[in-house]
Image: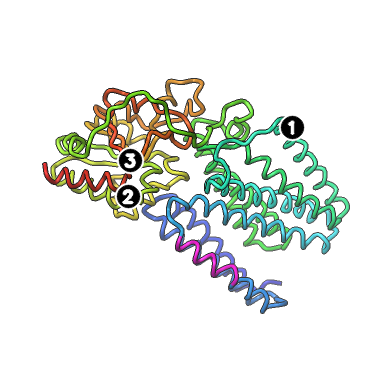
Amino acid sequence: MIPAWAQAAYLVAAICFILALKGLSSPRTARGGNLLGVAGALLAVVVTFLVADVANLGWIIAAVVVGAVPGVVIARRVVMTAMPQLVALFNGVGGAAAALVGLLEVAGTNVRGDLAAIAFTILVGAVSFSGSAVTFAKLQEIITTRPVLFPGGQYAAAVVLTAGVVLAGAVVFSGSSALAATLAGVGLVFGVLLVLPVGGADVPVVISLLNAFTGLAVAAGGYVLDNTLLLVAGTLVGASGTILTRLMAQAMGRSVPAILFGAFRAGSTAGAAGAAGTRPVRSAGPEDVAILLGYAHKVVIVPGYGLAVAQAQHTVHELAEVLQERGVAVSYAIHPVAGRMPGHMNVLLAEANVPYEQLHEMEVANPELRAADVALVVGANDVVNPAARTSPGSPIYGMPILDVDQAKAVVFLKRSMRPGFAGIENELLHDPRTTLLFGDAKESLMKLIAAVKNL
């Protein structure tokens, strides 16, 4: 029986998790929310060690140290561009941990309800682990970011899933550890088959979906272990991951099934491809672009993944300050899926101390873009591509975009003519109102700062 004080401590930890999710909903409160979640998790772990009759305590502490040390080092050293990969990796580890708990608990029970929860934990946790490993490999470009298809792939995935469901039922009625291990193997295979056909800008959506899977597996594990806090925490992760997946899909103008299975009917974003064609574009030097910016009344900056790659968030903020000193109104247009995960641009710009009131979400930013003298696009592509509105055959057709093409003038800072993460060309680059400034984003912004100061 868990003591009353420990139950109260678990309740406090659960409240911390709920408030942490609330804090993470806004860039202004995200740091505090994250710290609150960490505090809740730490409280829960400490209380568990104090009230549980823990065997092999030395081995457990050693395992915690072995996991914590590299975890801290990796998390501190990871650059913002690699944060989605880190999220995928950590999520996969959580799914694997849940599946291992299920495998260890099979032999200790013959209660059908518990065995059903165990089978669910093993299958879903294994899917989350292997699927997250594939998303990590895609984002890290260890394997191609494009959809990986093979003849009959969808049927193979359906057969494997059916086998998993049948095996799960067999585990429930037999309690066999051997069948449970086989179920884990089937789950690993299905996770790979589920994610391989997903490509391009769809991959971050799948990370969010797999995060929900991990949460549900952890919640089922909490039921098996009779741990209410684990059940609450897993449910929160599962629910928030599901909501986030739905919001990301809406931001891309697509359904979750279309994202998962669109490649089988040529409806998936393709992923990074080679350079665009040889059609002419209008390019200019920093001095010419500086004139456009320095004598504008209103400039809207549109950040994208290229900004993160160049680590140019501080430089773009410095340019904005220089323009504001000249009386230019400056704001930032933030697309919900700019970068490679929700909030990516908000975190980057907050790191550079950009005032929160200048960060405008799409519903506010689009009217401002229509009134802007210049839209300055720094490393974004797919989220400003008019093909989302004008090309029914495009893989991004229907995705809500920032109305950059409606500004009086458009300036793109680009390293090359390579297409965006979705792998398709942007017609806006060839628009007569568009000027391209080629080069590394950070270096180009520094040149613009110097040129604006010399006006």
* Element type where label 3 sits in the image: strand
Instruction: Please give the residue where the numbered disc 1 appears in the rendered image.
Output: 155
Quarter of the image for residue 101 reads bottom right
Crowd tier of the residue under label 1, counting other residues whose Cα lies within 10 Å: few below 14, some 14–19, many 20 or above = few
For the residue carrying disc 2, how many other residues have a C-alpha within 10 Å: few (<14), some (14-19), or many (20+)?
A: many
Q: Mark 3 and mark 2: span between their CA atoms? A: 9 Å
Location of residue 143 with respect to 265 vertically, above or below = below
Q: Any mark on residue 378, and which?
A: 3
Q: Would you say residue 75 sits in the magenta stretch?
A: yes
Mark with earlier residue (2, 1)? 1
Residue 213 visible: yes
Q: Do the residues labelled 3 and 2 touch (CB within 8 Å)?
A: yes
- Residue sitting farthest toward the bottom: 58
**According to the image, label 2 marks what residue?**
312
State yes or no: residue 454 in magenta: no
**Residue type at tag 3:** Val
